[in-house]
Image (cartoon, helix red, strand yellow):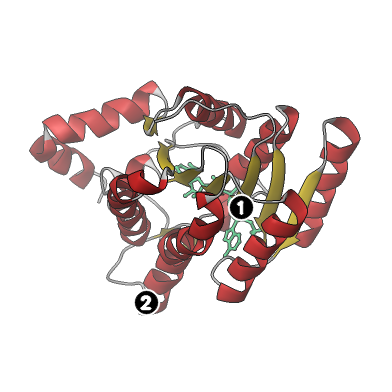
Amino acid sequence: MAKRTIAGSRVLLTGASSGIGRALATQLVAQGARVLAIARRRERLEELAQQLTAALGRLEILAGDITSAELRDAALACARERLGGLDMLINNAGSGAMGPFAEATAERLRQVMDVNFFAPAEMIRTALPLLKSGNRPLVVNVSSVLGHRGVPFCAEYCASKFALQGLSESLRAELVPSGIDLLVVSPARTDTEFFSQAIKGEQSRWPKMRGTSSEFVAARTLSAIRTGRHEIVLTPGGKLFVWANRLFPRLMDSLVARYT
Ligand SMILES: NC(=O)c1ccc[n+]([C@@H]2O[C@H](COP(=O)([O-])OP(=O)(O)OC[C@H]3O[C@@H](n4cnc5c(N)ncnc54)[C@H](OP(=O)(O)O)[C@@H]3O)[C@@H](O)[C@H]2O)c1
């Protein structure tokens, strides 16, 4: 994958109102990128834009729901008008659901798949024509270590991230002739609003673990973009989790089953 500079890149970033997306917006602007940030909570985006514009550089914002085709079209029109094109699409917005699958509803599954899979997939399809004329174009999909290994009480979320992984691998090869690269970022547990915002079923039985910071995930993501990586798994614990599953899947089956 090509190495690239962040300065001057025109970036469309979803899920910028909190957590990892907010940290990505901040670090991208600090490093000289021109960013169009999307999320539903307009007031959060406005507050971030004010902060960044005063201290680091201009942030363009667009409030809306990425599961809406109209919003996705509007985002691309905005990138064309306000950024003058697009070099990078970062699909970061995501949401979770917790609790036993058997006691959940078809609606919960559909909601999670809509935000974590269908919306980023369609965002990529919508953005392709503009990306093709971009400078060293790149799609970044924020997945999860749970896109490599499923765990109990997160079935919908794991399924959505596995789907994103599969789509990403296929597109990485398919987009080679268009010159568009694709990076998948798989954070491990990160301290954000993710868990308080998740659709909740029964309380999780997973041991409480300290997470890493959004700033760390954002910094590692920008470093992977600069150095031309196509896949990163964050934190030593996250790497151990993914590799243990590749090497010893049966052992991992019995380990994760202890938390049911
Ligand atoms: N936190 C973790 O432990 C962890 C671990 C691995 C992977 N991840 C992944 O990292 C990404 C960022 O999550 P986070 O931890 O930073 O969580 P977060 O703080 O809850 O941020 C999620 C972002 O997504 C936006 N969003 C959610 N649904 C949306 C929709 N329908 N339309 C537009 N924007 C939407 C939210 O903004 P609004 O509510 O304002 O729309 C928010 O800005 C997600 O893809 C998540 O799956 C997180």
Q: Which residue is mark 1?
A: 15
Quadrant of the drawing holding the N terminus: top left
Given the image, on which type of amino acid does mark 2 rest? Thr
User: Quick one: 201 or 3, which is closer to the camera?
Assistant: 3
Categorize mark 1 by other alpha carbons within 10 Å: few (<14), some (14-19), many (20+). many
Q: Is residue 224 left or right of residue 230?
A: right
Picture mark count: 2
| Residue 166 position within the rendered picture, expressed as x and y whole percent measured from the top left | 28, 52
Mark 1 sits near ligand 1, with its Cβ under 8 Å away: yes
Distance between the Cα atoms at labels 2 and 1? 25 Å
| Residue 253 position within the rendered picture, expressed as x and y whole percent measured from the top left | 15, 43
Given the image, on which type of amino acid does mark 1 rest? Gly
Q: Which residue is mark 2?
A: 105
| Residue 60 position within the rendered picture, expressed as x and y whole percent measured from the top left | 77, 50
Categorize mark 2 by other alpha carbons within 10 Å: few (<14), some (14-19), many (20+). few
| Residue 236 position within the rendered picture, expressed as x and y whole percent measured from the top left | 37, 21
Instruction: Residue lying at the far right in this picture: please name it.
Output: 54
As displayed, is residue 44 above or below residue 213? below
Task: Say whether residue 195 is visible.
Answer: no
As displayed, is residue 17 above or below residue 26? below
User: Tag 1, which secondary structure?
Assistant: loop
Task: Say whether residue 241 is visible.
Answer: yes
Pick whichever of labels 2 and 1 is earlier in the sequence: 1
As displayed, is residue 100 above or below residue 191? below
**Residue at figure coordinates x 35%, y 78% from the top left:** 106
**Residue at figure coordinates x 44%, y 29% from the top left:** 2
